[in-house]
Amino acid sequence: MRILHTMLRVGNLSRSIEFYTNVLGMTLLRQKEYPDGEFTLAFIGYGDESSHTVIELTYNWGRDQYELGNAFGHIALEVDDVYSATEQIRKLGGKILRDAGPMNAGLTIIAFIEDPDGYQIELIGKK
């Protein structure tokens, strides 16, 4: 078994694809509309779905926002250098929630950013 994808509901599919591809450097792997269900799915990631876990962005037609609730935590991405990744994301207009630095009660370097729909993404330095 392996994890295939994580699904996020988004209020503006184009805006979300723009963020994940241009700000975080992912690739749009596939996208399909489902007129009978009135939704569109877009799969994005850092590699082919056959060997990488990806993110499924789900856009329900006519719905432009969601309440995130308090059960979901965050997505984590490993990066070579959290400091430079955070600065690059800032330059591209990304929202930084927590600047790069050591985690609370630890030495691992982390940062937190937010996608256009308010989902938190943790950047973790390579060990």
Image: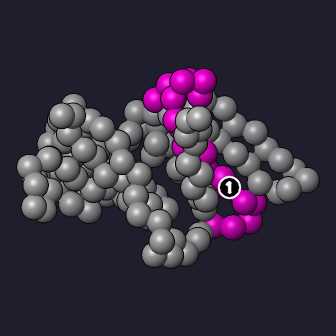
At horizontal 79% and vertical 44% (from top left) the residue drawn is 33
Q: Residues within 10 Å of mark 1 (few under 14, many from 20)?
A: many
Write down the region rendered in magenta: 46-64
Q: Is residue 125 left or right of residue 6?
A: left
At horizontal 87% and vertical 50% (from top left) the residue drawn is 35
Q: Quadrant for residue 115, please give it.
A: bottom left
At horizontal 35% and vertical 42% (from top left) the residue drawn is 77
- Extreme-right residue of the structure: 36
Q: Where is residue 126 in the image (x, y as percent from the top left)?
A: 21, 34
For the C terminus, the image quarter is: top left
Q: Position of residue 121 (x, y in %)?
A: 36, 53
Magenta stretch holds residue 62 = yes
Q: Residue beneath label 1, please?
A: 59
Under circle 1, the secondary element is: strand
- Rendering colour mode: one colour
Q: What residue type is labelled 1?
A: Tyr
At horizontal 66% and vertical 53% (from top left) the residue drawn is 58
Nearer the observer, 13 or 113: 113
Q: Position of residue 69 (x, y in %)?
A: 50, 76
Nearer the observer, 71 or 85: 71
Question: Main SS type for the magenta part?
Answer: loop
Q: Position of residue 9 (x, y in %)?
A: 61, 59
For the N terminus, the image quarter is: top right
Q: Is residue 105 left or right of residue 38?
A: left
Q: Quadrant for residue 48, please give it.
A: top right
From where the camera sits, is residue 91 visible?
no
